[in-house]
Amino acid sequence: MKKLHVKKGDTVYVNAGNDKGKTGKVLAVITDKDRVIVEGVNIVSKHTKPNSKQPQGGIVKQEASIHISNVQLLDPAASKPTPTRIGRKFVDGKKIRYAKKSGEEIK
């Protein structure tokens, strides 16, 4: 399995693309394609057929995936959340992620 710098539930900053500058929560990580789905970012219109949920069918707005290289984790320790790189280190025999800017552990 690949080592990726973001996990589901992390708050990230989009640093490239049409939604540059937006922040959001990671809803899903697609490891085999190196992509993430971020809440409120890369909204697309999907045409749906009528089904039990939507008897009329119609156009649904939903998030599409973006490449994982276009997002950066937000530093949880900073007073104003700022994008940071992450590192990994062993503490008490467990590998943890930490923010490179502040050195704070990422939960």
Image (cartoon, rainbow, N blue to C red):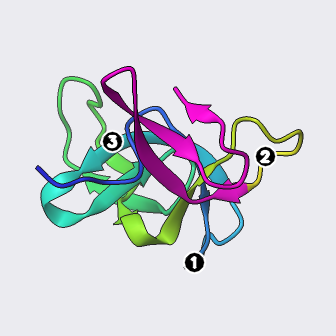
SS of the residue under disc 3: strand
Q: 61 or 24, which is in the foreground?
A: 24
Dot 1: element? loop
Instruction: Report the residue marked by disc 3.
Output: 28
Percent of width and height locating residue 84:
64, 57
Please give left or right for residue 104 compared with residue 90 in the image.
Answer: right
Query: Disc 1 and disc 2: Cα gap in Å?
Result: 18 Å
Give percent across and percent down for residue 39.
52, 44
Q: Which range is magenta?
A: 83-107
Q: Which residue is located at x 59 percent, y 77 percent?
A: 18
Which of the 4 image quadrants contains residue 82?
Answer: bottom right
Residue at the limit of the structure toward the bottom, as seen here = 17
Query: Disc 2 designates what residue?
Result: 81
Up the image or down, 94 lies above or below 47; here it is above
**Going from the N terminus, do you reach mark 3 or mark 2 first?**
3
Note whether 1 is above or below 44 in the view shown: above
Q: How busy is the neighbourhood of tag 1: few (under 14 within 10 Å), some, or many (20 plus)?
A: some
Q: Using the rendered view, name the quadrant where residue 32 is placed.
A: bottom left
Callouts 1 and 2 close, C-beta under 8 Å: no
Q: Report the residue at 37% width, 58% height from top.
A: 64
Is residue 61 at least partly visible in the picture? no
Q: Which residue is mark 1?
A: 16
Q: Residues within 10 Å of mark 2 (few under 14, many from 20)?
A: some
Name the residue type under label 2: Pro
Sequence-first tag of 1 and 2: 1
Give the residue type at disc 3.
Answer: Ala
Query: Please, what secondary structure does the residue beneath circle 2 have?
Result: loop
At 51% across and 53% down in the image, what residue appears? 86
Marks 1, 2: nearer the viewer: 2
How many numbered dots are placed on residues in this image? Answer: 3
Give the CA distance from mark 3 to mark 2.
21 Å
